[in-house]
Amino acid sequence: MSQQQRIHHQPGPQLPKHKRRYLRNAIPPAARHVKGWRYFAGLFGGEHIAATEFVIGVTFVTMGVGTKELLLGLLIGNLLAVASWMIVTTPIAVETRRSLFSYLEQITGSHFSKIYNSAILLFYGSLAAAMITVSAYAVRFALDLPVQLEAYPTSIAFIIVTLLLSAVVVIVAARGFEAMANFATICSPWMLTCFICGAAIALPTLAMHVHGSTEVSSFSDFLSVARDSIWTGTTPEGKPGISTWEVAAFAWANGAMVHLGLIDMATFRFAHRKWYGVFSSIGMFLGHYIGWISAGLMGAGAAVLVGKSLINLDSADVAFATLGYVGLLAVICAGWTTANACLYRAGLAASALMPSMTRSKVTAIIGIVIAAAACFPFVAQSVMPLTVYGAILLSPVGAITIAEHYLLPKLGLTRYWSRYLGQKLNLAALLAWGIALAFAVTMVVTKAISFYYIFLPEYLIALILYPIAASFMGAKDSWPTHEMRQEEKEQVLINFEQKRLAENANSDDEEEDPSDAHTANIAKVLLVGAGAILIFMVVLAVRLVCLAPSGEALKTMQQDYFYTAIALTFAYFVIAFCAMRVTDGPSDEEEESTPQTTQDTAQQPLSSAPSTNSPQS
């Protein structure tokens, strides 16, 4: 059907403005509860410090990445990820003020949303299992159980420990995630500190092992140690490592399901301005760039300290060798908080598939399956490819959404055509997603291109194919009444946004701090104190690098630091928890004023809903 032959569905009589009920929900709740830049800076500063960083950073070492390839590749990949948040995710989130799940149901129908929720359940259920296994590694080490290096468990005691940890995770996730979100918010800056300190502790040991001297007085000295003992460019088997562009592709793919895949619309629908995607750089360069590099340093240093090959160590071995019991606590907290968030999201996705059951019951059922999977060390050993598989599985849906929102109108096709047809399943979207996934599976099986590149052409396939398929399935038609009503709703939102921006031209924060001035000042003092403790931990670790002696004196200094770190960690958590209690505001009322459907929250990041409880607020 040509452009000139479009079917025009005749409009009905226009209702008086006061009777246009379809305008009642023209302004989504997120538009009335926007957040300023400080919120997103704090959110991304903590959200990307997780247990996955321990595993990924060490895996880069065992994959034989070269030092130059790692440093340059991570820089390029993380810049591309930030650009994706800025150019792709934030603009559509601010324009619609809706989560992907709400918007996706409008453009693809409820049946497609159920299929997508199944994919969410699969990915985040697998990631939750992996994170429980990582926490179990730390408990395994503390109880002196055998290290789990096979794909299957080799210790009954390890299985029991994993099941007990899984039970705790399931109970917390089933009861909701607010308390866990607050705990994770407190843990995140401390965990980043642990990464940096662990790397600093490991560096003199590596220098001594390679050059016979603990001196690392310049960046060139660091590069020399790194090339010779950490990122050597060859695998333990002597094969060449992955290239700069493969490192960059992985760094980009690691979060592709949330930026290119638009899952972070749930976060950025609250953004005051479209350019707030730039604050994702805080998470990318603190959590991913510094975190992965630090974890690699810790892994290589642990191998020297323990006297074993890195491939024979797990995350608990690495953390204890470089940070003592504080390292074990960091592994437990990182795995636990990440697992809780993933299980909560998986439970919400499952609830959308089983609406007749309560969320707690659904989460418990899903948790049993995840607990069984967590007993197999294979899932934790597969974290790095798992994140790429997540990008391959979920990113094409983001491409379909972008095509619907931006490309269809530019091509003379009708946006929301599937909804206007009353379809519960947008076959064009399902076809585009299916063909994109078929391409990806073919590339994985044939190895025609590097595994880390697959998500890029796959994304483009879905982006191009969806408008073509839609044009043959009804998008060329016209529905004047529906389109007029939709334009009126969008104009109401545009007018509201313009008015809000005009009223807050000199302010980036719409909402005021719910605490009174006295309480806010107390919280600031406590937070400054907590931050000072973390800075002191880093200073002591860097001092060890600068003043590191040789031989037994170095080991003594390291042991002294481990004990000091325990005391500082205890002080930090006490002060940070006090700050959280002081800043506890009337979040329940705000939660009620910003209702979210199950699909709205199913993939929301751990702290993405507006909350006045977070110290980062």
Image: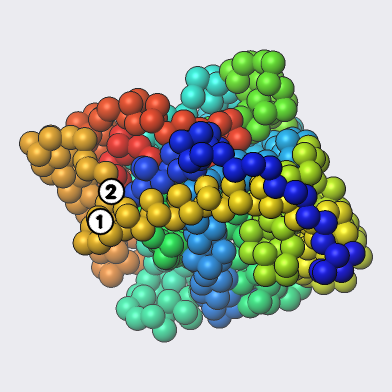
Residue lying at 50% horizontally and 20% vertically, measured from the top left: 175
Looking at the figure, which quarter contains the N terminus? Answer: bottom right
As displayed, is residue 253 above or below residue 483?
below
- Which residue occupies 38% across, 30% down? 593
Q: Is residue 379 left or right of residue 52?
A: right
- The reply to whether discs 2 and 1 touch (Cβ–Cβ < 8 Å) is yes
x and y, in percent, of residue 12 in the image: 68, 42
What residue is pinned by disc 2?
Answer: 510
Count neighbours of disc 1 (C-alpha within 10 A) and say few if under 14, some if 14 to 19, many if 20 or more: few
Q: What residue type is labelled 1?
A: Asn
Residue at left offset 17%, top offset 48%: 528
- How far apart marks 2 and 1 lie (CA) works out to 7 Å
- Residue 130 picture location, percent across and down: 64, 40
Secondary element at tag 1: loop
In the picture as drawn, the residue positioned furthest to the left comes out as 518
Task: Tell me the kind of residue under disc 2.
Answer: Glu
Quadrant location, the C terminus:
top left
Residue 533 picture location, percent across and down: 22, 48
Query: Is residue 71 visible to us here?
Result: yes
Disc 1 target residue: 504
Residue at image coords 25%, 30%: 585
Instruction: State whether residue 205 is above or below residue 364.
Output: below
